[in-house]
Image (cartoon, rainbow, N blue to C red):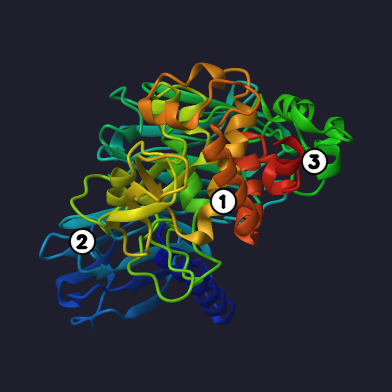
Amino acid sequence: MTLLNRILFLAMAVAASASQAQSNCSGSTLAINLLTDNYASETQWQLRNAAGQALASSTASLNNNTLYEQDLCLTEGNYSFTITDSYGDGICCGYGNGYFQLLIDGEEIANGGQFGDEETVPISITAGTDTSCSGHALELALNTDNYGSETQWDITLNGQQVASGGGYSSNQSYTEALCLADGNYTLTVTDSYGDGMCCSQGNGGYSLTLAGQTLASGGEFSDQQTRQFSLPIDDGGDGGGGGDNGGGGGDLEAYYASAAGLTGYALKSELHSIIGNHTTQSYGALWDFYLAYETDSYYENNYTILDIYSENPQSADPYNFTPGSDQCGTYNSEADCYNREHSFPRSWFGGSVAPMNSDVHHIFATDGQVNAWRGSYPFGEVGNASRTSQNGSLLGSARSGLGYSGTVFEPIDEFKGDLARAYFYMATRYQDRISGWQNNSSYGNAVLDGSSQQVFETWHLEMLKRWHNEDPVSQKELDRNDAAEQFQGNRNPFVDHPEWVESIW
């Protein structure tokens, strides 16, 4: 769901609830919320009954970039909502951020905006529908790929199906509200063509959450992907999306208890034992993490993608990315789209190798073009820049005295500590294998010293420590660390305990 969609969802839900409270509808209230794009005259909608008769429609002429809300009282039966665009480019996102949302008695049943000529949503009203949930209220978010009709899902309890879905449109976002009792469940997502939801034919994915905690997520598979989860979730957070280590943001003392009193490489080895068995997520699931957790509620507070290569902490960003709809894709220049930046380049650890390839602790949302400029060059401090991103990130030859004379990439000061702590995490989480990575890449060789203890060449280690000290842990990092544990079940110790950098190195 895009930033605009999220904002509208909150605003519209309030409006829908207020409207419903004032209504004396004896059936079910269908709320139709529509935000037009830059060419509203191209947009029309119509609601029909099962016999094809038109029951309601939009006004003859809509204004550009305007929010319209309409409540309809429907009796039991089947209906269809159809929205059309006469130009054939939908209402999002080439010419504005238009959006439609349908709610029945305050519960969202469909939303969208990215379509061609038209999109039709089937609506079923049943008598005596009770939208309250006496069990666990879950949410299944789906982003379909270029072939949405191939995607289906179901949830089973003891082999019996308790929920299912399918018949989706392509390149759309859906939210399914679920109410489940206690038990051990299996979520199965299938693709009839056998190429999953990501990434050869779009960037689809799914995420199952309970009160903001991810129980299951994915999208990169072939015929099907299965995830198990249990309700209720224990305090350790090991319900599918989490791991077995427990702790969480609320009990760090217990999480790191076995490391108490240790220093030096003994501390590093024990931290490796604590964080070393996280739940490997798919590479495609990173898109879902970004949708949920990699948005800007710290600088402009506009909930666009928080891209460390375009974020301007001091003033307005040079451009913004809408979560979901601006995923790469192809790009030709800066500001085209955002993608997944391995801050510790994957060529250094041998390519698309699990679990490093999808370890969210070192993979950040960044501008696609700037990510390409950075490539596999080491992070460093630039003396003579050949490229400068719009937020001031630099690519160029290393400054004199750094200890390295090649090409380096320098992020802005705001994120140097974040990246340094990501590197200390990598040195610790992969302590059992990182000594073998030195010769995978010439740039990796310039950074790695071939050991499992110090890990980094002295020039790079000293720079990382300086970045770590000069850019202390921020609230953004603390929140991301909590989210990462929910996503894959482990934490970055150097965000929780910055003093351990000095204790070890």
The structure residue drawn at horizontal position 65% and vertical position 60%, both measured from the top left corner, is 475
Question: Compared to 234, does 126 lie above or below?
Answer: below
Residue 90 tag number: 2
Depth check, mark 2 against mark 1: the one in front is: 1
Which residue type carries mark 2? Gly
The structure residue drawn at horizontal position 46% and vertical position 63%, both measured from the top left corner, is 103
Furthest residue in direction front, as rendered: 401
Mark 1 Cα shell of 10 Å, populated few (<14), some (14-19), many (≥20): many
Label 3 or label 1, whichever comes before in sequence order: 3
Asked whether the viewer can see residue 62, the reply is yes
Question: Compared to 472, does 40 lie above or below?
Answer: below
Which residue type carries mark 3? Asp
Furthest residue in direction left, as rendered: 87
Question: Is residue 102 toward the left or the right of residue 370 in the image?
Answer: right
Give the number of callouts.
Answer: 3
Q: Helix or strand or loop: what does disc 3 sit on?
A: loop
Instruction: Tell me whether circle 2 and circle 1 mark residues in contact (CB < 8 Å).
Output: no
Question: Compared to 24, does 367 lie above or below?
Answer: above
What percent of the width, then of the height, locates residue 500?
Answer: 75, 42
The residue under label 3 is: 235
Residue 418 tag number: 1
Label 2 or label 1, whichever comes before in sequence order: 2
Q: CA distance from mark 3 to mark 2?
A: 44 Å
Mark 2 Cα shell of 10 Å, populated few (<14), some (14-19), many (≥20): many
Q: Helix or strand or loop: what does disc 1 sit on?
A: helix
Depth check, mark 3 against mark 1: the one in front is: 1
- The residue closer to the viewer here, 58 or 461, is 461
